[in-house]
Every structure is written in C-alpha cells, then in structure tokens.
Amino acid sequence: MNPKADTIKVCFIAPKAYPLFNHGVKALFGGAEMDLHILATELAKDNKFAVSFVTADYGQRPVEEINHVRIIKSLDFKKNIFDGAIKVWRALRKAEAQIYFQEAASWGTFLVALFCKLNKRAFVYRTASLRECNGTYMKENLLAGKAFRWSLRNAACVIVQNQAGSDAILETLGIRTEVISGAHHLPPLSHQKRDTILWVARSAKVKRPELFIKLAQEMPEEHFTMVCRRATGDQDYEKLLEQAKAVRNLVFIERAEFDEIDRYFSRAKVFVCTSRAEGFPNTYIEACKHGTPILSLCVNPDDFITKYRCGLCAGDDWRRFVSGLKQMLNPGQAEEYGKNARRYAEQNHDITVIIEKYKTLFDQFGRIQFGKRGSLRRYSGPSTAP
C-alpha cells in the first residue's frame, strides 16, 4: 500500500480483532472488534484513504496487508502490561496516521489518547456501551475511569451509537458527540426454516445469560439455542455450562466462528436479549438484517424496537418478557416484526450509507491536522443522527 500525498491515513486499534481478518486464527473477539473491522475494510475500498489496523500478536508477520488494510502487530497477551503498552505505542508510531480510532473503554483508550495528544494526531473514540456514557464505567473503575474521562475530553471527536448515549455523555462529561449508527453489510434475506429461539453474547454478568436458561425452562415445548462465549475473567462459566446442559430443550454452543453467526440468526424465530445495559448491540443489527424479531428484557436503545415495531421490550418485567415471547411466536406476528426489522436495518444500518458519514468526519480531520491551520480542534460538524 503506497498512499498518495493527499491520502488520509486512518488507524484503527483493536488488539483482539485479528481473527476477523484471518479466519484461520481461532480466538475470541467481541462487538467492538466487529465494529472496527467492518468500518476499516469498507473504508479501505476508497483510494482516498490509507487504512491501518493495530492488532495483538497472534504469530503473524509484523506487518501484512489483508483486504487492503495494513495490519500491524503489537502486544502479546502473554506478556506483562508494560511490555504490551510499549509494543502498542511502537505500532501506533509505525502506522503514521493522521487519525487514530478506538472503541470500548480500557487502559488502551488512555494510551491511544495520550499518543495522539503528544504527537498532535486526531483521536476519535466510539463508545461501546451506555455504561461508558452515563458514568457507570468511571464509578466502577476509579483510576481507569479518571484516565477514560481525560481521554474523552482530549478526543477530537466522540461517537455514540444512539441519542440516549449522546444525552448521557453530555450530562456526565459535558461533551457533545456525534451520533452514528452501527453498520453492517446487508445480504439478501434467506428463506431458511426458522426453528429455534436464539441468544448470542458473552457470559459477562451484565448480559445475564442465566435468564435465558430460565426462559427455556419455562417453555419446554420450544427449542432454544444459546451461543455463549466465556467472558474474560469469568470464573463461573463452567457452572453456567452445567446449568444449560440440564435443560433438555436448550442447545448450548460455547463458541461460533464469525462466518457462522449469520446461519444462527437466519434460522431463529426470535432473537432474545437479557442484558441489563448495552450501547446498541451488534446482535440487534444482526437480527434486523436477517428479518428476525427481537425480544428484549430491558435494553431498547432510543426505543427503536417498539418505535419501528421490530419486536417487543419487557421493561425488565419477567412476566411481560415470557408472555411477550409467546405472543411473538405467533407466525403472523413474527413475520410482521421480521419485515419491520429488515426494513429498519436497510434504512439505518447499511454500511454503504454509514461509511459516508465517517468519510466526511475523517476528511475534516485530515485537512485540519496537516492543513494550513496546523492545529487540531474538536469536530464541530453537523450531527449525523441515525
């Protein structure tokens, strides 16, 4: 990749994203990694942008190119945090980008923000959860929370996934944000037989996976599928696994590869979410793009599920949750919700549309950082609400 002089260089940072570029590597990744992989690969299709991506060390070459994205190897998860920080810093320097883009709160957020501050680069942050916007993350992680607060206040732009997140972060930190919906590729709808009720997430406590098992127990006449990867640091995963195995009408899948996820969503009658808090889950977009109705126990970003009639939200009321599932299993009702969900995805989450909003954003930072003005300032362009 030999960018021209006027090319805008954008670097994405997500250490666990390498398996999304190289499907031969079987390792865990999450929604943030999926977000940035989709954005990076789509952006790289435009010759105006030179895209790099900092990932962890999975045994690959120091630098390689996949799908027109320059992959730069950095930290080794087996080494200590200081060694990792040094290697990430070196990788950021090797990227030589004008814009550095990171998602999901961690010490890595502070590291990237600090690098950009010292090197006069544009740091763009995208929130991964409402917990990052409403102050919960900062309260639960005192030192890391302070570093996260500093990072956001020194970001050139903070992007949130919905209006609720924008309102929360304005109230909490006084920061104005850009609202840009999550983006996915939208394949044609398949006409596969729908024969299961689906749950997909990590085993993190905030996801409340045990409640899906309870739901399956309450409806023994229905078939349930649970795709549940072990969350980092989860010491109770085996216990959860044993609980699931005891339920005869529930299939528990410990991991599914990236290219297998579509198959699960396309055969689901209903997608179920039991999370206590989210930003805008990738799984919601996955469900919508496959025309799969959504049943949420609690999470309903900007009330889109009910506003666009993509399914039902129970307001954290268990009885309403169970009765809602029974209602949604009515074939006519499910078909209506499914069509609405697909229409919503087409209107709000098509990557070919969403990427243009990012290009506008990146174009401004490319000009500001290296243009005649020579100084970096927070993005003040028009709101890009979904």
Image: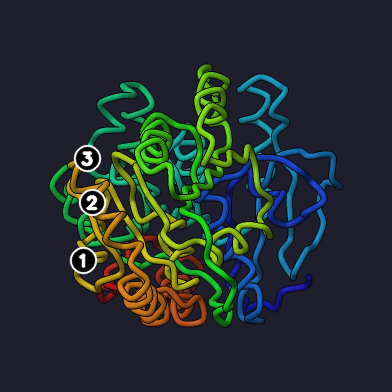
Q: Quadrant of the N terminus?
A: bottom right
The x and y percentages for residue 286 are 49, 63
Closer to the camera in the image, 146 or 19: 19
Residue at horizontal 70 percent and vertical 34 percent from the top: 75
Distance in Å between CA atoms under marks 3 and 2: 9 Å
At 51% across and 38% down in the image, what residue appears?
202
Percent of width and height locating residue 383: 25, 73
One can see residue 147 in this view: yes
Q: Which residue is mark 2?
A: 323
Asked if the residue under mark 1 is in contact with the one under mark 2, i.e. CB atoms within 8 Å, the reply is: no
Residue 306, label in figure = 1
- Residue drawn at (52%, 66%), measured in percent from left and top? 194
Amino acid type, mark 3: Trp
Q: First in sequence: mark 2 or mark 1? A: 1
Dot 1 or dot 3: first in sequence order is 1
Residue under the image location 65 percent in, 31 percent down: 86
Closer to the eye: label 3 or 2: 2
Q: Quadrant of the C terminus?
A: bottom left
Q: Position of residue 54 (x, y in %)?
A: 66, 49
In this rendering, is residue 244 above or below 328? above
Task: Choose mark 2 or mark 1, whichever is in front.
Answer: 2
Q: Is residue 39 visible?
A: no
Report how far apart the C-alphas of labels 2 and 1 lie in the structure.
16 Å
* Disc 2, SS: helix
Q: Secondary structure at mark 1?
A: helix
Cβ–Cβ below 8 Å for labels 3 and 2? no
